[in-house]
Amino acid sequence: MKTVSIDRSKCVGCRNCEMACAFARTGTTCESQESNIKVNHYLDERVLMPMTCLHCSEAWCMSVCPAGAISRNADTNAVVIDEDRCAGCKMCMLACPFGNIHFDNEKLVSRKCDLCDGAPKCVEHCIAGALKYEDMNDNAAALRCKNDHKLIAQAL
Amino acid sequence: MQTDVLIIGNSAAGLSAAETIRKYDFDKKITIVSKESGPAYSRVLLPYVLRGKLDYDNLFIRDGNYYIENNFYYIEGLIVSVNTESKTAVCESSEIIKYDSLLIATGSNPVKPPIPGIESEGVYHMWTKDDLDHLMPHFNKDKRVVVIGSGFVSLQAAWSAVCKGLKVTVIELADRIMPSVIDNKGAEILTGKIKECGVDLRIDTLTLAIKKRDDGTFVIDLKDQSSIEADFIIVGTGVKPNTSFLEETDIDIDRGICVNRYMQTSVDDVYAAGDVAGGPTAFGDQHQIHALWPTAIEMGKVAGMNILGKQFVYEGSLNMNVTQMYDMTVASMGQFTDNLDCDEHLMPESSGMGYLKICAKDDQIIGACLIGKTSAMKIFGMLRPVIRLNKKLKVDITRLESDLQKLTYGVAH
Ligand SMILES: Cc1cc2nc3c(=O)[nH]c(=O)nc-3n(C[C@H](O)[C@H](O)[C@H](O)COP(=O)(O)OP(=O)(O)OC[C@H]3O[C@@H](n4cnc5c(N)ncnc54)[C@H](O)[C@@H]3O)c2cc1C
């Protein structure tokens, strides 16, 4: 299964990923508040960190959704929100320990990364090689994902 | 009939347990019984359907083939008694079900306060799909509704009525709204919003009587306040765990069914989970009833794991609540009430998040309460593991969001 892996040490903070995501979602704007990926800057620590859904194997948001609106896409393994079913109750935002679920203030539904049906635009537009869409079974990718899985295990 | 696992309850806790068992074992015979007919639906969605945010069909949270695909044996029926010695449960239809393991996930039911006239036709709760079916035809513009009680569910019912253009009155016995869900300041802010939305909010008053007139409308008499007229009434003054069918058993019940960290009751092979159960909390309480959806899901999972014999320990429930009403996001988590001995940190107005209070004790966050904007919800999500795992964090409120991210993602200085 493929996923978006993040190599913080390579991120240059250009925010191309945010713009690409915002545009892919809306088709009209590149404004970063419309994006499902966020690059955080921690100046004191000199760290840049892109944050996007980790598609946790035990996804809490999915178990807890009281509307049955969150499921796993069988083809891409992405954890996805069905916006017709989403009530906009925000329980998934309470559940996500990573702050990776966002809210669409116009449609009044939650939104999150869906891996662009298997062709993530954030990866396509990453100029630094910090984001990769790769098979987790691949050794190098597995190493990069290990950090994420450690985080998931700690947080859930 | 005979079954390996009998689950009484076809909702959050019951299904979470059933699905957990299925994940590891496809052969165990699992029987699910529900007194409500039809496939599983979500109570949480009732107000969203009432106000027209969701289609009625979306109430049903598992698709049509669910029971067959998962090899669940589903019985529509009321369980009237259980015998834990012979390991049997009896349905209203007199059918006897023999089990190896029993999970009680029967939830809770609304209580009726002792008000004369409360049994009249036209007085409803908003708790089940049946209630929704009764309420839907009344949710028309120009109708007048009185909501008795101002808890989380009642205020959502009132908000649905506001959205549909009804004339709404809310009556509360206490001197403020939503006693257990938000703090005093939060209640004050929300009270302002509720009134701005045109609701006639009557606090600090007792409902003396509900009188039905010949034309079918109601007059509600209040103590020391003017009476109110209404076309129908919604009562939401608290709930009580569904345990009456257990009277003849030795199962320990203290309001709810007492369970340990494995969701075991005091009787072997009998488990309980969800609104019906009082279990351990993240703050060290032994038997607390939350009556919240996420807690029901967690408890169901723990019960399922232990029915499989996996010795899975529950870390303790953490109360968390969120909803959108009166154009505000209302949320709370952990400990946040006014009487606590703790440090309170208020998010500055410039954050644009609204009223957000963080409670901390010795560099450990213990709870939060919000009447404000969705943008604050990410803080709540990240707080959950921080509160649960007792992670240390010195609260600097202006940097809280980024400090939480750093803690979450292990970004070190
Ligand atoms: C209008 C409304 C809004 C809510 N909003 C929220 C919210 O925003 N957030 C939140 O966290 N919680 C909310 N809740 C609470 C939440 O719905 C409950 O905590 C949750 O449903 C509990 O799940 P449960 O499985 O324990 O019990 P229930 O959902 O109550 O299910 C009980 C099951 O047991 C069956 N049953 C009961 N007795 C018997 C019997 N004797 N024989 C056979 N079957 C029986 C019932 O048919 C049902 O299938 C809301 C509740 C309501 C009513």
Image: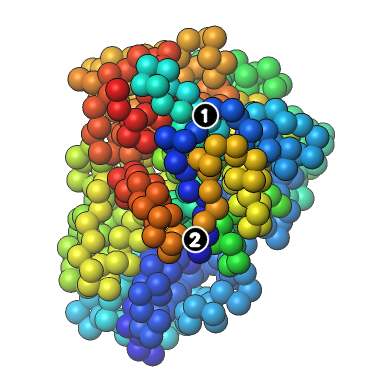
Q: Is residue B322 above or below residue B356?
A: below
Question: Which residue is more in the foreground, A79 or B342?
Answer: A79
Q: Position of residue B105 (x, y in %)?
A: 38, 63
Q: Is mark 2 within 8 Å of ligand 1?
A: no
Image spot of residue B108 (x, y percent): 42, 53
Residue shown at 60%/66% (left/top)?
A75
Residue B293 to residue B129: above or below: above
Compared across the picture, whether B195 is left or right of B208 comes to right
**Residue found 28% across the figure and 50% down from its top:** B278
Please state the chain letter of the residue tagged with numbered disc 2 in the rendered image. A
Quarter of the image that includes the N terminus of chain B: bottom left
User: Could you tell me residue B259's position as x and y percent?
Assistant: 23, 56
**Quadrant housing residue B284:** top left
* Residue designated by label 2: A135
Taking B114 as reference, is B364 above or below it?
A: above
Compared across the picture, whether A59 is left or right of B65 comes to: left
Q: Is residue B301 above or below residue A15?
A: below
Task: Give the camera-side residue of A81 and B237.
Answer: A81
Helix, strand or loop at disc 1? loop
Nearer to us of marks 1 and 2 is 1
Amino acid type at image mark 1: Val
Colour option used: rainbow
Percent of width and height locating residue B251? 21, 64
As helix, strand or loop, the secondary structure at mark 2 comes to strand
Residue behind mark 1: A12
